[in-house]
Structures are given as C-alpha cells and as structure tokens.
Amino acid sequence: MSLSKTLAAAYCAAVILLQTYKVFATTAYNERHWPFMNYPMYSAAYGPGDRVAEVKLVVRPCDGGDPEPFTHADARLIYFQFRKAVMQAGDVLGNTPPATSARAVEFLRDRIQRYAPKPACGWSVWSKLYEIGPGGLELPGLPWKKAGPWPIPPAPAAAADSARAAG
Amino acid sequence: MADPAGAGGGGGLGEGGGVKRLLERLDRFWFEPARLTDLAIVRIVVVAMELLLLLSPYLADTVGACVGCSLPYQRWLVTLSGDQYRPLPTMQVLMLPLGRHARPELMFLEAVWLAAVVGGVGALIGRYTRLSLFALAAGSTLLTAHAYSYGERHHPEALLTIMLWTLVLVPSGARLSLDALLFRVRLARATGRFHQRPPEPELSPHARWPLRLMQVMLSLAYFSAGYSKLMNGGLAWLNGYTLAHYIAGDAIVRGSAFGVWLARHMALLRLMSVGALVIELGFWVVLFWPRLVWLGVVAGAGLHVGIYVLQRAPFPQFIALYVVFIDELRRYSPFRRRAAKPAPVWTVVYDGLCPLCIRTMTVLDALDWRHRLAFVDLERDWGRAAALAPGLSAGAARHAMHVVAPDGTVYRGYAAFRRLASVLPLLWPLAPLMALPLADRVGSAVYDGVARNRGRIPCRAETCAV
C-alpha cells in the first residue's frame, strides 16, 4: 500500500474510532469533544399523562408601560439555562423544591436588574401546560398560570446603566 | 478448498488467505478509484452549504441551522459573562497560539468569520483550493466551537465540519476549479498547444475514501440516534406518546401548526416512531447494498424535512452531505437514461499558433462539461477542418475562430462565439446580454479588433500542416 493510502487509512480509522467511542461510551449526551459526539436527542420515553409546558418571563417596567417579555438573549444566558431557571422559578411542573425555586427567583431577579432594556420594578412567570392524553396532545391545554409577581428593588443606578450600555 | 500457497498448515494459510481477501475487499471499499469530478462536486456542495450558513444570519441563527456561523450571535456571545465560557477541547486547540483558555474578542471573531467567508468563496470557485478550504474549515470550526463553549450544543454542524477538514486533505480542487483551469492554461502556454480533456472521467483512489468516510460517519450518526432511543427509552419509545411529547413540546414553543395537529394523531405517531427508528438503525445497510442508496437518501432526507416541519429542528447539513453518495446515486439511479443518443457535436476550428486562441480553447473546453465540443487546430489538422467546412479557406480560418454546427453550418468570429454560448450551459447567463440591440455589431467589432491584434507563434515545420 502506498504511503498516501496508508496515511488516508490511518486518518479514516482515527476519525471512525473517535466517533464510535463517542457513540458507544454512553447514551447520555457526550458532546464535550465536538465535532465528535453522539446523537441521543429525543431519546427518553414518555407515556400518557406527561405534560409539556409553554413558559414566558414578563417584566413590568418602572415607567408604568406595558409588561414586556424578557428572553434568554436579554438575560445573556444560553436558552436551556434560562428556560430551566424560569421553569424552576415558576415551579411550572409543580415538582420544584422551594429552596431551588427561591434560588432561581434570585438568579433571574439579578439578571433582570442588570440587563432589562428598561428599568424594571417587577416580574412574573407565565406558564401553560398541555397534557399528553390517551389520544395524544390535549388541546387547548390548561389555563395560563401566573407565578409572582416578584418585586425588583432599585439597583445602584451606575451599575445597571453600565450593564445596559454594555449591551 | 485447495491451499493456494501449496504448503502445509492448511488452517493457518487458509486464514491467511481469508485475511488477504478481507484486505482486498477493504482496499476496494475504501480505495477503488472514483471520479475526481465527483469529489469536486462534493466540495462545491459542502462549501456552498457552509457559505450559505455563514452569509445568512436568518438560516444560521433564526432557523438555528448553525448558530456559530451567525455574526450577530457571535456578537451576542461576547456580551456573556466570562464565567459562562468553558472552552471545548476543539476551541482550546484552535486558540493555542493565543493561549488555550483565552476567550476570543469580537474583533478576532469577526476577522475569523471574514477569513472563513473569503476561504469559502475561494474553495467554491476552486482558487488556491486547499488553502481556501483550510481557511473555511478552521474558521467555521472555531466559530462553532466558540458558540458551543457556553454550555449549549447542537448537532447539525458536526459532520459537515469533519467533511470540510477531510476535503483539505484530498485533491478536491483537481476538477471544476479555477486551479485546474489555470493549470491547463499554464500547460498550454508551456507546450504551445491546446490539450483537450479526455472524454473519460479521471479516476483516483483519493476521490473514494473521503466519500466513504462520510458515508460511514452518517451511518454512525443515525445509528447513534436509534441506539440511544433503544437504550434510553426502550420499546416504550415506540408507544406514540413519546413522539407526541417531543413534537408537541417543540411545535408549541416554535410555532408549528402541523406539529400541533400531528401530536393528536396517535396512529400516525406510532407509525412514524417505527419509521424513524428503522431509518436510524438501518441506514448503515446502504454501505453494503449500494442499490439501496436511493431508498436510504430519500428516507433520510424525508426524516430531516419531517423533523423540521414538525419541530422546527433544522439539519440542512445532513441533507447536503448526502452528496457523498453521488457515485451510487448515479450508478443505481432509477431515472438513468439507457442507451441515450450521443449529443451532436459542434466543432471549433482554431488557430493553433495563436496563444490567445489556445487559452480560449482551454477555457471553452473547461466549460464544456457535457463534451459537446470538438476542437480542430487548423495548423496541425487542416485536412479535417477542410472536410468539415469545404467552403472555408485556411486564410479565413486564421483570421477568426470558426464553429461548424452539427448540420454543417459554419459560423465565424463573434457569431461563432454566440453559438458556443448557446451550447455551453455555463455561458447561458450571457444570453440576455447578447440579445441586446447592437450587441451583434459591438460584439463583432470587439472580436475583430482582438483577432487583428493577437500575437502568433512563428510557424514551425512540425506544427504547420497548411
């Protein structure tokens, strides 16, 4: 076998072995060595009675304007981290320990205080649950539920302004 | 079975023969010479996909097909606090010159994005192909690795990234590239004559293994998805409720009315669950039964389109990567035309002692991927030219390019170029320009001006047949 073929074979073997290792080492997410990773998304099983949630975080501006949504991009958090915190703060699925919920409330309050586009004086979590019943998704789902509102103490003006300016 | 070596210890040697056969089969599987043109097409498709993602913030970020490719997303990432940045090992390797754990600044990321785009354009047209591919591969890897160094990771970009790096290593610019064209122009200049492309495609073992590698990687990715479902969810994954849960969750949040509708139809959901698992666990079959490639590709693309329509989870890169099955798709195409009539050939009569004409013929030949043109050098093969166009004199042929149509009609100068532009699809974009009023008059004047002022190589005894 020529040198070029030997090198090509070694490259292919290395790439395939790395990928195979990532696939079979675990069926939990194994993505640290991206782009070599496994593909376990959507792999857990669910049954009748499981629920899916729609959630949003809404802030009330201090200037008396209409409540506005506050997103993960506003909070400068990755989507999953933000969604997890919102779900915990609002105890959306009804299974969050109170201490965890309190920590999530504090965490989000800090984010809102620092990064809300306009100074905010309160915030709340709105959630709507949908159940997967015997016939699949049950519509229209449960009514919207509000958790909060939680007040936001005025931040030191300079700190909040500089955070907003940085954004 | 007879021992081919003819020596004792039959079992051992039999095994040796088995190993030899296995090695031969492996060699055929990985290194059977394949068309360099196929490899070039793979380069063009893969690079075009990556370039599209880099240049379209909508597709990259809003649709979510490659968040790292989007400059607005990179600008947002640098506003996150430093403690959220945990560089992936890939990122650490790429950042080594600046320090493994150094967090890139916006200006650096913008420069990397620009280098990736410039590299992408170069790789697409095939100019400095390897260097351009390297810039694109390194740039897009760094951007995506950076995006995934804050805790959120997605799957669509991984295989395309590996493919880009693989293309850096192989002669993907040997065909359908400016590099290849310029090489032929230089060759023509050095030898003083035009060399027509052979009609048969050129083959190379290094055009096979990159495609095989990605075929195996695609199969592994699909198998991983199916295997995880079986291991994590078991057969309960097929109960229909599972798919209802996933589709409903994504469809409600991301706004897919079709997904919401489907999440209420259990029979369809159960059927689709089985279908998805069969495709994922069985995709590797196409590696060994290439006749099934069409089925695998259609099923796989259907799976990705379905996932996007129902859940708004985009995997366009995977669909683009199906181009690595190009050889199998062509060989076992159900749409293959059998015993098609050979296309009529247009003959170009050119002056083989004129460097400009030689360059022009080289370019025309490169554009002629359907092999519709034949070329006759009037100085070396005047007999053939005279037979094709009896009314044409050598003197007139020296003054301008002539094209002989399949029906024998002879076109001269600019009119000949116009006919060629209608024969070569890559020149079709010029058609509207040539249809403008006065285009014929201006075109003829320009053509005649250039033809009058072109240089000629002095006639040598062995080259002048006239």
Image (cartoon, coloured by chain):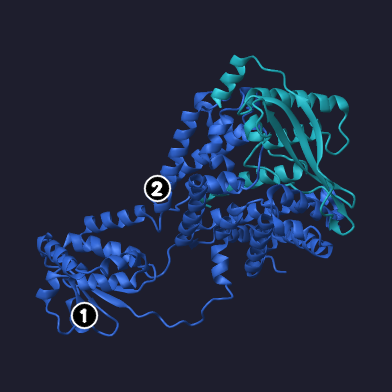
**Upstream in the sequence, badge 2 or badge 1?**
2
Q: Colour of chain A?
A: cyan
Q: Nearer the viewer, residue B6 or B203?
A: B203
Same chain for the residues under marks 2 and 1 in the image: yes
Q: Is residue B258 above or below residue B462?
A: above
Q: Nearer the viewer, residue B311 or B277?
A: B311
Q: Is residue B165 above or below residue B379?
A: above
Q: CA distance from mark 2 to mark 1?
A: 39 Å
Q: On residue B410, which mark appears?
A: 1
User: Which chain, by letter, is blue?
Assistant: B
SS state under label 2: helix
Specify whether residue A111 is in view. Answer: yes
Which residue does the numbered mark 2 point to in the structure image? B122
SS state under label 1: strand
Identified at 86% across, 24% down, the residue is A99
**Circle 2 marks a residue in which chain?**
B
**Circle 1 marks a residue in which chain?**
B
Disc 1 marks a residue whose amino acid type is Val
Q: Residues within 10 Å of mark 2 (few under 14, many from 20)?
A: many
Q: Is residue B379 above or below residue B205?
A: below
Q: Nearer the viewer, residue A91 or B172?
A: A91
Identified at 61% across, 19% down, the residue is A160
Which x, y percent locates residue A153?
Answer: 72, 18
Q: Residues within 10 Å of mark 1 (few under 14, many from 20)?
A: many
Report the side of B121 relative to B422 (left or right).
right
Disc 2 marks a residue whose amino acid type is Gly
Which x, y percent locates residue B291?
Answer: 64, 70
